[in-house]
Amino acid sequence: MNAPLTSSETVRLTQSDEAAGALLRADGQPVADDFPILARPIRKRRLSYLDNGATTQKPRAVIQALDQFYEQSNANIHRGVHWLSQHATDLYEQARDRVAGLLNAPDSQHVIFTRGTTEAINLVAQTWGQGLQAGDEILVTGMEHHSNIVPWQLLCARTGAVLRHARITDTGELDLADFKAQLNARTRLVGVAHVSNALGTINPVAELTRLAHAAGALVLIDGAQAVAHAAVDVQALDCDFYAFSGHKIYAPTGIGALYVRGSILKDLPPWQGGGDMIRTVSFDGSTWADGPQRFEAGTPNIAGSVALGAAIDYVRAIGLDRIAAHESALLAQATAAMQAIPGVRLIGTAPHKAGILSFLVDGIHPHDLGTILDTEGVAIRAGHHCAMPLMSHFGIPGTARASFALYNDLRDVEALVASVRKAQKLFGV
């Protein structure tokens, strides 16, 4: 790990890529070289892309996988007897195998392809949720993304069930005592973020799952902010559902996956009707396909699934442990540097965090700050981050958020610090 950045007014880094804390490939070159967009100047400046919590950039391997599929393998899957259809089907199912490997799922048939985390959670709400009754309860936490709140609100409105939430502390950690107090015999499901998208807090999901199961509840984990940053093992976590989005792990948008425990999957009713999710159809009634196909009606995002498989191969080749260590070092550097700036307030200071830094600058609205940083080539997110209840807890409308990825290095930290200083000077604060 690199030594902490100095607390001087501007931090100047003139080192090589390696000395600047870049994560390197096996050949000694920075992994950032694999991402074409990072070579594009923004406003005549080097791009410091720190909006990875919203979406990640794509390596050549993923872009090439998309191109190669359409150039050499394009056909519809599962239903064709010709060679191209069978070949495309093989690629699609191999991608499912890669997702299972990423999550250490016991069987790839426990993996359903979706458009992303939001659709995955809605799928659970509209299939498993059909069995809820008035008075049943769903428990989430106060730091959830709207995608792990709104589907449950809609479900509760339909069924008469009740949505509850466990409090968080002022450091942005889950109040475990309150979580335990909220669990009861009526709790049917716990929905929890593995990593908070707004704060970076890493929740103790294995412990929460153990507590939920002891109370008789199932557990859904929102893994959108986790899978690209550390190894995930759904068998060790013992969760019932695990959802993630491909575009957060260097794959295209519009593709993601939902892991479902096998004993639960076999009993879930269909979600959408149409082609490829059926076994038989007649005007007297229909029967359904087994396994994940029952939830993949219509032509899926075949190319996106193949590219997701390529993205998974890419991060696993680099090593998720190496990625986690690299991003942790960057977060430590950025945290120290930002804390040294007068007028900067960090939001979310839990001791166990992923590479997300949310902050406020006295006298500058986060949107104004984001705009000024953009003029310096620094891309951050500003707003409520689809976590309005969390912002209400802190009594603020939103934050500025810098989020790190495997291709970031200390030059990005330097650019962030320098541009925040510039914003303060422009605003006279």
Image (cartoon, rainbow, N blue to C red):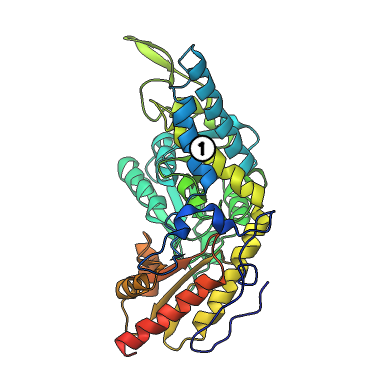
How many numbered marks does the figure carry? Answer: 1
Q: Nearer the viewer, residue 16 or 85?
A: 16
Q: Is residue 241 visible?
A: no
**Please, what is the three-letter code of the amino acid marked with disc 1?**
Ala
Q: Nearer the viewer, residue 7 or 411?
A: 411
**Mark 1, residues whose alpha carbon is within 10 Å: few (<14), some, or many (≥20)?**
some
**Above or below: residue 136 compared with residue 107:** below
Quadrant occupied by the N terminus: bottom right
Query: Could you say where residue 221 lies in the image, as x and y percent from the top left?
Result: 52, 49
Q: Is residue 85 visible?
A: yes
Q: Can you identify the residue that label 1 sits on? A: 65
Quadrant occupied by the C terminus: bottom left
Q: Nearer the viewer, residue 54 or 121?
A: 54
Occupied quadrant, residue 94: top right
Query: Could you say where residue 377 lies in the image, as x and y percent from the top left?
Result: 40, 69
Residue at coordinates 44% horizontally, 30% vertically from top-left?
A: 70
Left or right of 365, for residue 406: right
**Above or below: residue 127 compared with residue 190:** above
Query: Could you say where residue 67 lies in the image, as x and y percent from the top left?
Result: 46, 36
Occupied quadrant, residue 276: top left
**Above or below: residue 3 compared with residue 87:** below
Query: Could you say where residue 411 lies in the image, as x and y percent from the top left?
Result: 53, 72
Residue at coordinates 60% horizontally, 72% vertically from top-left?
A: 20
SS assignment at label 1? helix
Residue at coordinates 44% horizontally, 44% vertically from top-left?
A: 252
Residue at coordinates 55% horizontally, 60% vertically from top-left?
A: 407
